[in-house]
Image: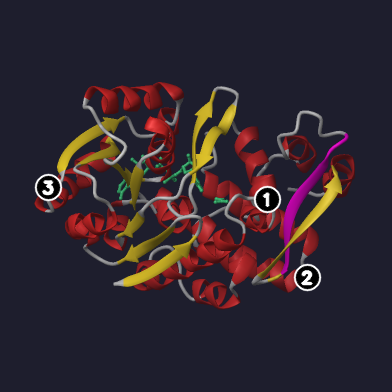
Amino acid sequence: MQTITVHASQAYPIWISHGLLAECGTLVRQQTKAQTAVVVTDDTVNELYGDTVTAALEQSGFRVLKFVFPHGEASKCSKTLNEIYDFLCGNNLTRTDCLVALGGGVVGDITGFAAATYLRGMDYVQIPTTLLAQVDSSVGGKTAIDLPGGKNLVGAFKQPVCVLCDPDTLRTLPRKFLADGMGEVIKYGMIWDEKLFALLEQYDLDRIHEVMDQVIASCVDIKRQVVEHDEFDTGERMILNFGHTLGHAVESYYHYVTYTHGSAVAAGMCMMAKKTCAEDVYQRLCRCVTAYELPTKVPAPMAELVPLCGNDKKRASASLRFIVCQHIGKAEIRSMPFTEFAAWMGGEQA
Ligand code: NAD
Ligand code: GLY
C-alpha cells in the first residue's frame, strides 16, 4: 500500500491500494473516534460498492447509516444538501461522528461541504471511485455545491481525515469518465512533471490500467505539494487550473452537455498551448490528448469562447489570470487585462 501524507492545516493520509474498499473499516477506525459513520453515495456507486463499504465499517465496530441520492451533477445542489442535513439531524448525529463520501467528485464535494457545516464541522472520509476524484477532487479540501447561478458557488475548505483510493473501482467506470479523468492526469504532467507526461505518452486509454497505481500516486503527490504550498488558493494553487480558463468557456458554450469537464480541459490545454508553445510541445500535447480519446479543439469559434472566460461580471476592467505551460512540466501564472486577453486570443482558431 502506498501512503502519501498531506501536511495541510490538518495532516491526513491518502492510502492507495487494490482492495481497499473491503478493508476500509480498519483504516477509517485509525482516523476517527466516531461511533456512527454515515456513508453518503449516489445510486450507481451504491449499487456497485455500497454493501462492501458498509460491511467493512460494521466489522470495525461502526454503526453505519447510508444516505443515497441520484447520480449526476444536478444532485450537487442545496436540495440534496438539505436532505443530508435532515438525515443527520433525524438520526441524531453528533460532532464526533463522521461522514464517508463514497463516489466521484459530486459525492465528495457535497459530503465534504455537509461535513464542513453540519454542527459547525465534523470529520469526513473520502473514498473516491472515479479517476477524477482519485487524482483531484478528493485531495486538498475544496468542498462545494452548485447554485442555479453557477457551479461551486457555495463552498468551504475542509480537509478530510483520510482518503482511501482503490484503483480496482476504476474497472467499472464507464470509458467516458475514465477519459474525463485522464484530462486532469495529462494536466498534472504538463504543469509539474515531464516524466509523468512521458509515461502517459507510452500508453493509451485501453492500456493505462497497467500503470494506473503509479499514475494515481504521481498525481496525488503533485496535488499534495501544491496544496501544502497554498492550501487556501491564494496563489500557486491556481496552476491546477491549466486548461480550465478556456475549458470552462467550452463547458459553458455547450451548456455543460456536449463536453465533460475533462474533455473541455483537454481542449482548453491544447488551445492555450497552440497560442503559447513551440510547435513540438503543442504537437506532443495533442498526440497525448488524442491517445486518451479527448478533443484537442472544439468547433466553437474562439471569438465566442473568449467572452465566456473568467466569471467576473465586470471583466472589461478586470484582469484575467490564466496558466501557461511553455515547457512540459512547468507552469506559469500570467495576468492580462481582459480586453487585452480577448484581443490576444480572439483571432485564434479554436
Ligand atoms: P461524478 O461524481 O458525477 O461521477 C461520474 C459518474 O460516474 C456518476 O454517474 C457516478 O455515479 C459514476 N461512478 C462513480 N464511480 C463509479 C465507478 N467506480 N464505477 C461506475 N460508475 C461510477 O463526477 P466526477 O467526474 O467524479 O466529479 C465531478 C465533480 O467533481 C464536479 O462537481 C466538479 O465540480 C468536482 N470537482 C471538485 C474538485 C475539488 O477540488 N473539490 C476538483 C475537480 C472537480
Ligand atoms: N481542482 C483545483 C483545486 O483543487 O484547486
Please name the residue shown 79% across and 58% down the image.
Answer: 275
According to the image, label 3 marks what residue? 58
Task: Decide whether residue 321 is among the magenta residues.
Answer: yes
Label 3 CB-ligand 1 distance < 8 A: no
Q: Nearer the viewer, residue 259 or 49?
A: 49
The circle on residue 278 is 2
Q: Which of 321 and 259 is in front in this view?
A: 321
Q: Nearer the viewer, residue 290 or 68?
A: 68
- Splitting the image into 4 quarters, where does residue 118 fall? top left
Task: Give the amino acid at mark 2.
Answer: Ala
Specify whether 327 is left or right of 104. right
According to the image, label 1 marks what residue? 234
Q: Which of the two discs, 1 and 3, labels the residue nearer the N terminus?
A: 3
Frontmost of labels 2 and 3 is 3
Task: Give the amino acid at mark 1.
Answer: Thr
Residues drawn in magenta? 317-326
Mark 3 residue crowding within 10 angstroms, few (<14) / some (14–19) / many (20+): some
Please name the residue shown 61% across and 69% down the image.
Answer: 192
Cα–Cα span, label 2 and label 3:
56 Å
- Splitting the image into 4 quarters, where does residue 311 fall? top right
**Displayed-image quarter of ligand 1:** top left
Where disc 3 sits, the SS reads helix
Mark 1 residue crowding within 10 angstroms, few (<14) / some (14–19) / many (20+): few
Q: Which of the two discs, 2 and 3, labels the residue nearer the N terminus?
A: 3
In this figure, which colouring scheme has been used for the structure?
Answer: secondary structure
Task: Give the amino acid at mark 3.
Answer: Glu
